[in-house]
Image (cartoon, helix red, strand yellow):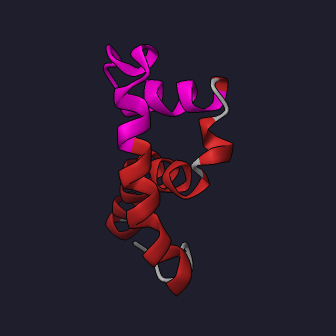
């Protein structure tokens, strides 16, 4: 994680929030057959879990952006 994405309190809270989130989505059949992280993130928004589990959602967004950022950096350094 990048240092500015989560402060020290949020880093501590993320573990607990993630644990609760995992239990929550395991009990929600709408999350059972998702194939991609982006589908998961979209369903989080539709079910408003992005608001309840904001740190988990922020982590998912960072995961989704990482491949794009890596591609951009690679291209920038190759030129």
Answer left or right for 73 relative to 50: left
Q: Is residue 40 magenta?
A: yes
Residue at the spot 55% in from the left edge and 72% down from the top edge: 5
The answer to whether residue 49 is above or below residue 62 is above
Q: Is residue 44 visible?
A: yes
Residue 37 rendering spot, x and y as whole percentages: 38, 33
Residue at the spot 49% in from the left edge and 52% down from the top edge: 56
Residue at the spot 41% in from the left edge and 63% down from the top edge: 16
Number of numbered labels in the structure image = 0
Which image quadrant: the N terminus? bottom left
Q: Main secondary structure of the magenta part?
A: helix
Extent of the magenta region: 22-45
Answer left or right for 71 relative to 45: left
Answer left or right for 45 relative to 72: right
The answer to whether residue 10 is above or below residue 69 is below
Residue at the spot 55% in from the left edge and 58% down from the top edge: 55
Residue 48 rendering spot, x and y as whole percentages: 67, 32
């Amino acid at each position: 994680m990048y240092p500015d994405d989560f402060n020290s309190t949020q880093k501590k809270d993320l573990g607990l929030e993630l644990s609760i989130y995992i239990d929550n989505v395991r009990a929600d059949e709408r999350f059972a057959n998702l194939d991609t992280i982006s589908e998961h993130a979209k369903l989080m928004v539709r079910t408003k879990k992005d608001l309840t589990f904001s740190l988990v959602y922020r982590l998912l967004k960072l995961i989704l952006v990482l491949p794009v950022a890596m591609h951009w950096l690679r291209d920038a350094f190759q030129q």
